[in-house]
Image (cartoon, rainbow, N blue to C red):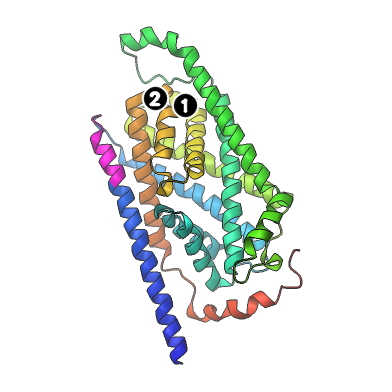
Amino acid sequence: MSRVRWRKRLIAAVKIVIAVVVVWGLGRHILRTWTDLQRHETPLQISPGFLALSGLLYLAGLVLCGLFYDDVLKASPTPIPRLAAVRAYLISHLGKYVPGKAMVVVMRAGMSAPHGARGATAAIATFYETLVMMAAGGLIAAAGFGLSGSPRVELGGDPPVLTFILPILGLVVVQVVSLLGLVGLGLGLLFLIVSWPPIFRRIARTATLPIPGGGPDALPFFSRRLLGLGLLRTTLAWLAMGLSQLAVIRGLTPLGPHELFAAFPLVVGSVALATVAGFVIAVFPGGLGVREGVLMYALGPALGADLAVVAALVLRLVWVASEFVAALALAPLGAPEVVLSAPIEQPEQPSTAGPS
């Protein structure tokens, strides 16, 4: 009894430490973004309704990715309820603001295990969902920049100096957009190759060997059907995130429906490329700095430098706030105490029937 009580206290202490670290990383992230936004001298005319819509669209995109995380677990020997998988996915997103990005895997696996998933299986499902999402993001970026056509969106009349220099810079802007599309295509194909079932299966087998409870019998069955489903779900997620950025832009400037529609391909391509780049250049937590830099650069030709900078920073704040609110709402929906004993016996049952 004392050993069980000691174990419960240790688990509770670990959870508290993780919560403190995550809150510290989140607060540091918000403070830095807010400081950068205050340094920008452009006056803000914010429409709260559109910012709220932006947050809802972002969460809709995350839920689609969470559903694919559940799909991967469903293809494993230890599936868990869909609500539990989506809950673990959404709450664990706060872990990306802790330097190193490993906290996402720790949190997601820790919240999936009480419902019956192996820790190694949840970790591999996290990696696979991320790789497929990045593959779809790169391809969406290429398509977005390719479909953007004329990259500039009219914002209600240009100053004379812009009217004079825009024809001169037009060719340069088109070349920049084409270059960004090629970068997105290259990254998308690279992630797609790594996510291809036979290739990722070999990677996963090697990666899970050192993990307790890992090995071939802990792996999901990676198939082309699962990959196709993931690409479909995450593509829809990227479209929702592009709409989220578009809602932020509309919340900062009174664009009409025609201007918003014309800007959408470039906006969704910019959001996708910026997020993928932030993931690839894993230096700062949550892609801070890298993602904003790419997003400002990509949106600049269409929105102008000032609006692009403000839109990128406000989007960051909206996304962080949305993740935090979602985590607060979902945190009470944890696994009941009676479920905690299930993972001890359950992994042994499918060991002979799991994919090899």
Q: CA distance from mark 2 to mark 1?
A: 9 Å
Q: Are marks 2 and 1 in contact (CB under 8 Å)?
A: yes
SS assignment at label 2: helix
**Residue corresponding to mark 2:** 303
Residue 136 drawn in magenta: no
Q: Main structural element of the magenta stretch: helix, strand or loop?
A: helix
State the mark number for residue 11: none
Q: At 63% across and 49% down in the image, what residue appears?
A: 230
Please provide percent x and percent y for residue 196: 70, 47
Residue 251 position by quadrant: top left
Q: Is residue 224 above or below residue 302?
A: below
| Residue 235 visible, this angle | no
Looking at the image, tell me whether mark 2 or mark 1 is earlier in sequence order.
1
Provide the residue span drawn in magenta.
Answer: 32-42
Please provide percent x and percent y for residue 6: 42, 85
Residue 353 appears left or right of 319 = right
Q: At 68% across and 46% down in the image, what residue appears?
A: 228
- The 10 Å Cα crowd at callout 2, few under 14, some 14 to 19, many 20 or more, is many
SS assignment at label 1: helix
- The 10 Å Cα crowd at callout 1, few under 14, some 14 to 19, many 20 or more, is many
Q: At 47% across and 37% down in the image, what residue appears?
A: 274
